[in-house]
Structures are given as C-alpha cells and as structure tokens.
Image: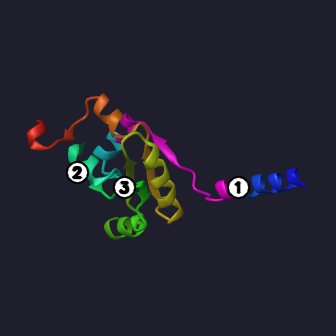
Amino acid sequence: MGNGIISLLFVVLLLLFCSSGAEVDTVDVHAARQLIQSGHRYLDVRTEEEFKKGHVHNSLNIPYMFNTPRGRVKNPKFIEQVSSACDKEEKLIVGCQSGVRSLYATTDLLNAEFKHVSNMGGGYLAWVENGFAINKPQDEL
C-alpha cells in the first residue's frame, strides 16, 4: 500500500508540474539585447533593492519576490501589477539577477495569457558580464 500512495503522489505532482501548459522561450543576453533594441520592453523582476544597485536602461521594475525577515516570498500582486503596466500583446523580455526568478515569472505571465514573453537566460549578471550598458546610481559611477 505504501508504494501505491507514493506512485499516486508522484503522478499527482507530475500532473501539477506539467499542467501549466506554458512553454517558456529563453533567450541569451545577446538576443535579449537585440530584441530590446528592436522594441521589446525589459521587465526586471528583481527586488527594488537589487534594481536600485543597477539595471538595464529603460527597464520596468516589478518584483516577482520580496525580501522579508523569513526570506523571499512571492509578490501576490505580481500579475496584477504587470497587467496594469503592460498590455498582454506587448513584447516583453523578463530578467532577474541570474535567470531563475525570471523563468518562474515568465511562466506565470504566459499562464496569465501574456502572448509575447521571453525569459532572459543568465539575467542581469550575464548582461553586466557581457559589458552591456546599464544604469547605476550616481555614487557608484
């Protein structure tokens, strides 16, 4: 009976994991840069603190997660906030610090019926490593 419960649990988890239906398109920073230059909007899903330390030019910051005393928690209004700032037909490149949060954020946006959303693999760290232009606070220039 124990194996049956474990098997059932595995199937349920597999269905939950695979049921999103969203297939995320991940582009590298070079492709992301070209897309941004051609009119795609950059959605930075890092925390406000991370964003203030430096960010891609003309980016929109809507945190996917917040820092709390208990660690990071998902922004419960993320989709609502993006929906109020962006049209569901708008072409978006979603980035974070390293590419993990943006993958989850991109999946959520696709599930919320945003049509043209891509994840930027490698995130802001890869953007900076490639020497691409950023905005930094004046005291760090």
- Residue at image location 44% in from the left, 54% down from the top: 117
Q: CA distance from mark 2 to mark 3?
A: 31 Å
Q: Is residue 52 left or right of residue 66?
A: left
Q: Which color scheme did the rendering employ for the protein?
A: rainbow
Question: Is residue 30 in the magenta section?
Answer: yes
Q: Amino acid at mark 1?
A: Leu
- Residue at image location 44% in from the left, 39% down from the top: 121
| Nearer to us: label 2 or label 3 | 3
Question: Is residue 29 in the magenta section?
Answer: yes
Q: Secondary structure at mark 1?
A: helix
| Nearer to us: label 2 or label 1 | 1
Q: CA distance from mark 2 to mark 1?
A: 39 Å
Label of residue 13 in the image? 1
Whether label 2 touches label 3, CB < 8 Å: no
Q: Amino acid at mark 3?
A: Pro
Tell me the quarter of the image containing the N terminus.
bottom right
The spot of residue 35 in percent (x, y) is 35, 44
Q: Residues within 10 Å of mark 1 (few under 14, many from 20)?
A: few
Label of residue 58 in the image? 2
Q: CA distance from mark 3 to mark 1?
A: 30 Å
- Residue at image location 70% in from the left, 55% down from the top: 13
Range covered by the magenta-colored residues: 16-32
Residue furthest front as drawn: 69
Tell me the quarter of the image containing the C terminus.
top left
Whether label 2 touches label 1, CB < 8 Å: no
Nearer-N-terminus badge (3/1): 1
Label of residue 69 in the image? 3
